[in-house]
Image: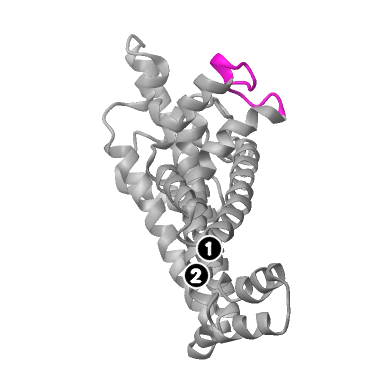
């Protein structure tokens, strides 16, 4: 188990190095000079050159890359050109809003996914099952930004029930959290439904029913416990994807999280902030994947014996 964990940790470090390298060169490949973007197209050339020297943008690209890697190890990504604050501080300031949004969406997706998936599996091929299946396909196929805009139009513009943007009140989280949760909800729902359908006719479930146990206990304890492995694995991996989806949702709802910070930084060619945002999200995603891998080994004895 320890050797497996160390091997996965080594792979995670390589993935993180790859992500850092890609974001560094991708930002430099974007056309336009960040110093000019900050000072404006009519800025004095001397001021532009001074700003480039201040942030090390006048150095050759290989030197900038080596300096970037050396500073990234200590979580020092430099200072924002635009906001004049350390990029790491800006990311950590906005990270709590993104984490709150992602966790709320995750809980919504799990609770509704398990409830609807169980309801559909215990009534297969009936009206409820068909309705749930159609809803699952819709939530998976509808574009996230379109769902967000429709929610704003209905619940904010027409019904005046919820705020359309910002994070001034707990109610402001409802629409972005639901928007972010819908794709994961569809995945969890289908996994729970198919997993329960596979195990509900197994011998141990038939035996539990023969003992006179209630259907709630049979499904909720005996059947559910034995189909959790794929759900836990996929749900854990999909949680990382919530952080990627948060970029779109935060932009639509003007949510003050890392996603919106990153999109604003990309538009302004603010290298330091973009690099800090991408690497922070990559670290979170890698850590979640590592935890899921170790949890999978712990839950499945067949995998545990092979590592």
Residue density around tag 2, few if under 14, some if 14–19, many if 20 or more, within 10 Å: many
* Front residue of 182 and 235: 182
Q: Position of residue 261 (x, y in %)?
A: 51, 32
Q: Secondary structure at mark 2?
A: helix
* Front residue of 81 and 144: 144
**Quadrant assignment for the N terminus:** bottom right
Q: Residue at x 64, y 32 (%)?
A: 173
Q: Position of residue 155 (x, y in %)?
A: 57, 22
Q: Residue at x 59, y 78 (%)?
A: 299
Region rendered in magenta? 156-169
Q: Secondary structure at mark 1?
A: helix
Which label is found at residue 193?
A: none
Q: Are marks 1 and 2 in contact (CB under 8 Å)?
A: yes
Look at the image and tell me whether residue 7 can be seen.
yes
Q: Earlier in the sequence, mark 1 or mark 2?
A: 1
> Does 17 appear in magenta?
no
Position of residue 27 in the picture relative to residue 151 (left or right) = left
How far is the residue under mark 1 from the one under mark 2? 6 Å
Q: Residue at x 33, y 9 (%)?
A: 42
Main structural element of the magenta stretch: helix, strand or loop?
Answer: loop
Q: Position of residue 174 (x, y in %)?
A: 63, 33
Q: Which residue is mark 2?
A: 197
Q: Which residue is mark 1?
A: 121
Position of residue 119 in the picture relative to residue 64 (left or right) = right
Above or below, 307 against 294 in this view is below
């Amino acid at each position: 188990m320890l050797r497996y964990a160390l091997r996965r940790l080594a792979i995670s470090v390589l993935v993180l190095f790859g992500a850092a390298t890609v974001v560094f060169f991708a930002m430099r490949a974007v056309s336009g000079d960040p110093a000019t973007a900050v000072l404006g197209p009519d800025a004095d050339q001397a001021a532009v050159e001074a700003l480039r020297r201040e942030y090390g943008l006048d150095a050759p690209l290989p030197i900038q890359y080596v300096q970037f890697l050396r500073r990234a190890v200590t979580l020092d990504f430099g200072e924002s050109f635009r906001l004049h604050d350390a990029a790491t501080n800006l990311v950590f300031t906005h990270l709590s809003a993104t984490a709150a949004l992602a966790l709320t969406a995750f809980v919504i997706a799990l609770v509704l996914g398990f409830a609807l998936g169980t309801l559909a599996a215990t009534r297969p091929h009936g009206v409820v099952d068909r309705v749930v299946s159609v809803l699952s396909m819709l939530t998976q196929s509808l574009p996230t930004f379109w769902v967000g805009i429709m929610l704003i139009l209905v619940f904010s513009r027409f019904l005046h029930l919820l705020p359309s943007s910002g994070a001034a009140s707990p109610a402001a989280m409802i629409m972005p959290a639901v928007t972010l949760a819908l794709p994961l909800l569809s995945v969890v729902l289908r996994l729970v439904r198919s997993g329960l359908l596979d195990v509900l006719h197994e011998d141990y479930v038939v035996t539990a029913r023969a003992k006179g146990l209630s259907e709630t206990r049979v499904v909720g304890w005996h059947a559910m416990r034995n189909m959790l492995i794929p759900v836990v694995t996929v749900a854990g991996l999909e949680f990382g994807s919530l952080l990627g989806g948060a970029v779109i949702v935060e932009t639509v709802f003007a949510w003050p999280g890392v996603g919106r910070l990153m999109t604003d930084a990309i538009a302004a060619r603010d290298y330091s902030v973009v690099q800090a945002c991408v690497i922070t999200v990559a670290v979170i995603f890698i850590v979640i994947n590592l935890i899921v891998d170790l949890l999978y080994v712990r839950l499945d004895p067949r995998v545990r014996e092979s590592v």
